[in-house]
Image (cartoon, rainbow, N blue to C red):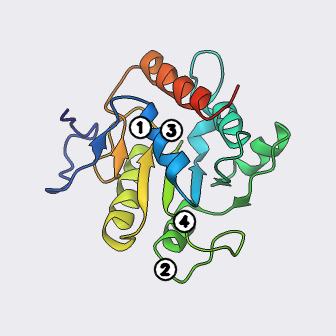
Amino acid sequence: MAAESWQTAEVPGPRKALVITKPEVVFAMVKKAKRPILVVGHEAVDIDLGKEKLIDYTIRLAKTGHVPVVATAHIVGEFIKRGFPPAAWMPAVDITNRLQDPEWKGLDGKGPYDVALFTGLPYYMQWILFSTLKHFALNLKTISLDRFYQPHATWSFPNMSVKDWNENLEVMLSKLGGK
């Protein structure tokens, strides 16, 4: 299935993200990963999935125990208000720089991450972050969990409605054992 960038003036190059046609793909990637990580941006506080905000979904995802969360920008306070301290807080550019560093031993000192999931960051920022990781973090697979196609990620959802996006996220969460 081919997908087009949501930001149409940008040209990603010949290598584009594989389209997530079924949320089970993300489940399989996370389960197979030795060291996954989830990066959550400030827009997660404002994005409404219908029944909850994106930040609440990411907390439920993190509580499955499969993936630690890095909060970016000012949302660490929002996580704490909801009773969930993230594994770390750092700017999005900083975590991206660390993810591309093969010498970085991760948040817990146990080694580099092999899968990085991103959500809640502005589209144009993710575009640049994924481009950086695509070119400089060759052993890292990246997954965009947002509802707009990110061609520089390894895997990305196609452009979709909030309803379809929410349904995909819920299927992925249920497969990981979340509520």
- The answer to whether 118 appears left or right of 161 in the picture is right
Q: Earlier in the sequence, mark 3 or mark 4?
A: 3
Q: Quadrant of the C terminus?
A: top right
Taking 175 as reference, is 2 left or right?
left
- In the image, what residue type sits under mark 1? Val
Q: Is residue 97 visible?
A: yes
Closer to the camera: disc 2 or disc 3? 3
Q: Is residue 148 above or below residue 137?
A: above
Structural distance between the alpha carbons of marks 3 and 1: 5 Å
Q: Quarter of the image containing the N terminus?
A: top left
Question: Which residue does the image show at 49% across and 80% down from the upper left?
Answer: 102
Separation (CA) of disc 1 from disc 2: 26 Å
Q: Which residue is mark 3?
A: 27
The kind of residue tagged 3 is Phe
First of labels 4, 1 by sequence position: 1
Which residue in the structure is indicated by mark 1? 25
The residue located at (31%, 32%) in the rendering is 158
Q: Nearer the viewer, residue 176 or 57?
A: 176
Check disc 4 and report the residue beneath it. Answer: 113
